[in-house]
Image (cartoon, helix red, strand yellow):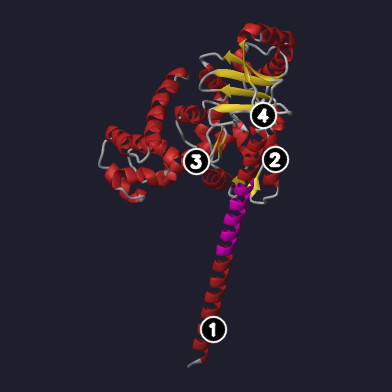
């Protein structure tokens, strides 16, 4: 065999071996990254379990924050404050040995919650601080401090309140006749005192106005209807900036760090990182990540759907249940390219009705209807 052929074959083999080695390194990197992410979530889940066990010693029904409820506890865990963004009410409970002690605790808790901002709420959250400690150990997780933003103050007060305004509000609200009493879990000398405070019925509208500039900026940036972003926020969290779900997902637009979080951060910042809970509890960053993910769904995953309105309906559903499940609704297969052919043969209204009837999960079917209805409402509110 001529020398040049031997040299060519040798170079070809060397190139193949190098390519194989690089591929193996990449696969090892991906595997290690997946392992790191899994270990991270295992540690976080353990932190949740440990914290709930601590609460269980005092409370019959220990609660943690959920999608539409923000829960916070005092340092001794004897005072629990729950803000229901969907139910539009504050419920404060305290375990105390006398009515006077209970009133003082309830007043203090009410004063804190009505003047709280996102940064101070996060700093006082013992569980969240444990989670942040875990996050900082993982090089694949990106975390940043939350910027302070008022939560309930603009909802309750027409203008920034003075100390006198806050004292008057608290004293007017916390009175013996507004407090109910029940038995404590593990104490014969203490009782549970409960105060319930109604929040304004237009809470979602007032909360939406806080985020208007940020939503407008990201809707323009990612080529989305402003009303879509608002409708997703209300449906996901009812504008609860401390929203947390078991998935886990965090913040206003309920970003799942391991999926939408990684995809969105990669799309925006060109780095494969997973945003931490603290990163996503920041309203501005959460809306950026959620809007970026809507862009990815509409302009990448569902791009083969030609009609803009049909694609929009599919995007709404996919935000909740994934593009694969949207495809399944049309073809009983998870391939969106094949589903797009059928979708393209249908009118937009037919696509909407089909999704409402055929999406695999009831939650996704209800979700689609809620988002679609709320889009129309926000179009009217902001005259879009």
Query: Cα distance, mark 3 to mark 4?
Result: 41 Å
Q: Which residue is mark 3?
A: 293
Residue at the spot x=62%, y=16% of the render? 154
Foreground tag (2 vs 4): 4
Foreground tag (3 vs 4): 4
Q: Which residue is mark 4?
A: 58
CA neighbours of label 4 inside 10 A, class few (<14), some (14 to 19), many (20+): some
Vertical order, 155 against 147 (above or below): above
CA neighbours of label 1 inside 10 A, class few (<14), some (14 to 19), many (20+): few
Foreground tag (3 vs 2): 2
x and y percent of residue 326 in the render? 36, 42
Badge 4 marks a residue whose secondary structure is: loop
Q: Earlier in the sequence, mark 3 or mark 1?
A: 1
Residue 303 in view: no
Query: Cα distance, mark 1 to mark 4?
Result: 73 Å
CA neighbours of label 2 inside 10 A, class few (<14), some (14 to 19), many (20+): some
Q: Which residue is mark 2?
A: 130
Q: Residue furthest bottom?
A: 1
**Magenta-highlighted residues:** 27-43
The quadrant in which residue 210 appears is: top right
Determine contact: label 3, label 1, CB under 8 Å: no
- Which of the labelled discs sits on residue 121, or is there none? none
Majority SS type along the magenta span = helix
Q: Earlier in the sequence, mark 1 or mark 2?
A: 1
Query: Cα distance, mark 1 to mark 2?
Result: 55 Å
Residue at the spot x=54%, y=71% of the render? 19
x and y percent of residue 267 in the render? 54, 46
Q: Earlier in the sequence, mark 2 or mark 4?
A: 4
Asked if residue 274 lies in the magenta stretch, the reply is: no
Q: Which residue is mark 1?
A: 10
Vertical order, 137 against 242 (above or below): below
x and y percent of residue 6 in the render? 51, 88
């Amino acid at each position: 065999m001529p020398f040049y052929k031997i040299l060519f074959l040798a170079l070809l083999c060397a190139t193949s071996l190098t390519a194989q080695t690089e591929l193996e390194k990449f696969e090892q990197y991906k595997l290690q990254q997946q392992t790191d992410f899994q270990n991270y979530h295992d540690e976080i889940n353990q932190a949740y379990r440990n914290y709930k066990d601590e609460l269980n010693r005092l409370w019959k029904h220990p609660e943690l924050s959920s999608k539409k409820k923000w829960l916070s506890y005092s340092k001794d865990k004897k005072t629990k404050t729950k803000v229901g963004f969907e139910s539009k009410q504050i419920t404060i409970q305290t375990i105390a040995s006398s009515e006077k002690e209970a009133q003082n605790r309830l007043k203090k808790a009410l004063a804190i919650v009505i003047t709280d901002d996102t940064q101070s709420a996060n700093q006082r959250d013992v569980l969240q601080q444990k989670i942040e400690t875990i996050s900082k150990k993982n090089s694949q997780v990106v975390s940043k401090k939350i910027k302070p933003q008022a939560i309930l103050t603009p909802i309750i007060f027409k203008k920034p309140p003075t100390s006198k305004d806050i004292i008057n509000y608290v004293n007017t609200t916390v009175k013996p006749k507004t407090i109910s009493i029940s038995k404590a879990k593990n104490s014969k000398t203490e009782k549970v005192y409960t105060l319930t405070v109604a929040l304004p019925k237009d809470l979602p509208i007032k909360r939406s106005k806080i985020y208007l500039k940020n939503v407008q900026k990201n809707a323009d940036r990612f080529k989305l209807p402003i009303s879509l972003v608002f409708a997703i926020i209300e449906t996901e969290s009812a504008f609860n900036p401390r929203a947390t779900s078991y998935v886990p997902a965090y913040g206003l637009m309920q970003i799942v760090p391991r999926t939408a979080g990684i995809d969105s951060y990669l799309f925006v910042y060109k780095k494969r990182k997973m945003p931490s809970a603290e990163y996503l509890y920041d309203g501005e960053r959460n809306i950026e990540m959620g809007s970026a993910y809507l862009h990815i769904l509409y302009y990448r995953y569902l791009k083969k759907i030609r009609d803009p309105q049909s694609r929009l309906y599919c995007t709404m559903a996919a935000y909740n249940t994934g593009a694969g499940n949207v495809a399944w609704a049309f073809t009983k297969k998870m391939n969106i390219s094949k589903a797009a052919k059928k979708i393209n043969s249908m009118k937009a209204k037919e696509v909407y009705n089909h999704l409402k009837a055929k999406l695999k999960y009831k939650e996704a079917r209800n979700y689609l209807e809620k988002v679609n209805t709320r889009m129309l409402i926000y179009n009217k509110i902001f005259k879009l």
